[in-house]
Image (cartoon, rainbow, N blue to C red):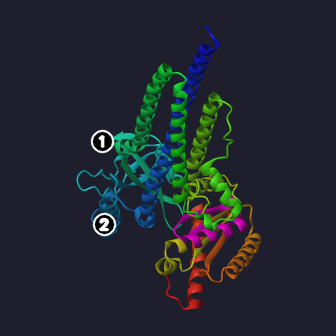
Amino acid sequence: MDRKQTNVKTSMRNFIIALALLLTTNILMGVILVNVSKNALRAQIEERMLDVSKTAAAQIDGDVLKNITAEDKDTEEYNRTLNILRSFQDNIELDYIYGVKPGPNNTFTFTIDPDREDPADFGETIETTDAIVSAANGRSDVDKSPHSDDWGRFYSAYSPVYDTEGSVVGIIGVDFSADWYEKALNSQTSVAVIVTCIAVTIGIILSFIIMSQNRKRFTAMLNRLDDLDDVTQKIDKIIMAGSLKRLEMLPDADSTVLKTLASGETYDEHTPNEYEAVTSSIEKVYDKMRSFARYVEARSEIDGTTGVKNKACYRNRIKELDEQISAGKADFSAAFFDINGLKKIYVHHGFEAGEKLLFECAKVLKNVFGKENVYHVTGDEFIILTDQKQNWQMKDLFAEFEKELEKYNEEHVRDNILSVAKGFVTYDREKHKNYRQVFVETKAACDADKDDHYGRNKIELQ
């Protein structure tokens, strides 16, 4: 066997190895992206379920609910509570909503059921799950696995109802079809499996072509890798164009970081031979795919408009604080910030101007309170949760925030003024029984500051 034939066999072997690596990369990235997307989707679905149950629970009068009995049916108070639940049943995409009464030894019974066709009997026993036990203990929760009863198979979310004394006197349960929940999650898997199968099939076909054409297919292989690199470049552009954190808002250092996250590092294009060319191309695509996976994972925790922690992270932090409060170990302060006049900015200057103010406000909050403590919960509102910060320390931080705000407005006199209403409360174990009570006081303090702002400026309260 001459040297030329040896080189040909070596080329085939290395091409096959390179192809195997490429297929493995596709499969690996498919698994990673499925898991990341599935977890993010699960968090969004559970968050929606909890939002519905919490909203309904917040509208129920606990002092009325704790005294309602089966004999109160058709009374004014009974019908008022029934109508509240029925409005959720009729207007929100859910299967069932109902009231639950906690009993001794983690037993639970139905109270008010607004279902028109087949309501549960008052006092009928309901299956005990971890989520309903958590709600009875004052923490809203959602089932991690489905349960079955006479009405079907469901995932359920539960939120406590409090009386004026702050005691849990009832629970609002919300049922969502298990088939709907699992179908939503599995849809991500199905797409990934199809795409992966297509990629594997194409790879197998390419392997036979490469084996039959030998060294000639090195060029074809490199062309395919170039095509794949073009696709990653398109994904780069989509990531950059779709990011609501406009690059022109970022300082040069942060802009470079975001570009590197999307595009990856620069590679030396010099390759002595076709073997190294294939290896270099595969490494480049693989590194980009890993960057994309990190980007997708980050988006599940970071708010895209402001660059701070999102609502899902906020929910997790609330659970931690409630656990610390229950254990007697809580030591924190909460602050609420609301941008004044943002709606008018949207109307008169456009959404990009409003989003710029959101971004700039978040940047100031990060500078003063630390990025790890800032949450963008909704619209024009931010929440700060700081550990081991006392009342006087929060006052100092608020003063520093005012200075930063004044500095920003002085440096941007030609832009829209950034005005922020704010308020804070430091946790008091003698006064606060759970995080919700801290939040209510904090929000009230911010609202009072906002009212004072509009009163001073004679602007119609929004």
Mark 2: few, some, or many residues within 10 Å (few <14, many ≥20)?
A: some
Amino acid type at image mark 1:
Asp
Q: Pick whichever, 182 or 364, lies toward us.
A: 364
Provide the secondary structure element on which disc 1 rests.
loop
Give the residues in magenta: 354-382
Mark 1: few, some, or many residues within 10 Å (few <14, many ≥20)?
A: few
Residue 317 drawn at (x, y percent): 61, 55
For the point 56% across and 84% down, which residue is it? Answer: 451
122 left or right of 298 in image:
left
Q: Pick whichever, 329 or 306, lies toward us.
A: 306
Q: Using the rendered view, name the quadrant where residue 32 is placed.
A: top right
Residue that sits furthest to the left in the current view:
117
Q: Which residue is mark 1?
A: 150
Residue that sits furthest to the top in the current view:
1
The CA distance from mark 1 to mark 2 is: 25 Å
Q: Which residue is mark 2?
A: 79
Residue 412 drawn at (x, y percent): 66, 79
Report if residue 381 lies within the magenta region.
yes
Residue 126 drawn at (x, y percent): 38, 45
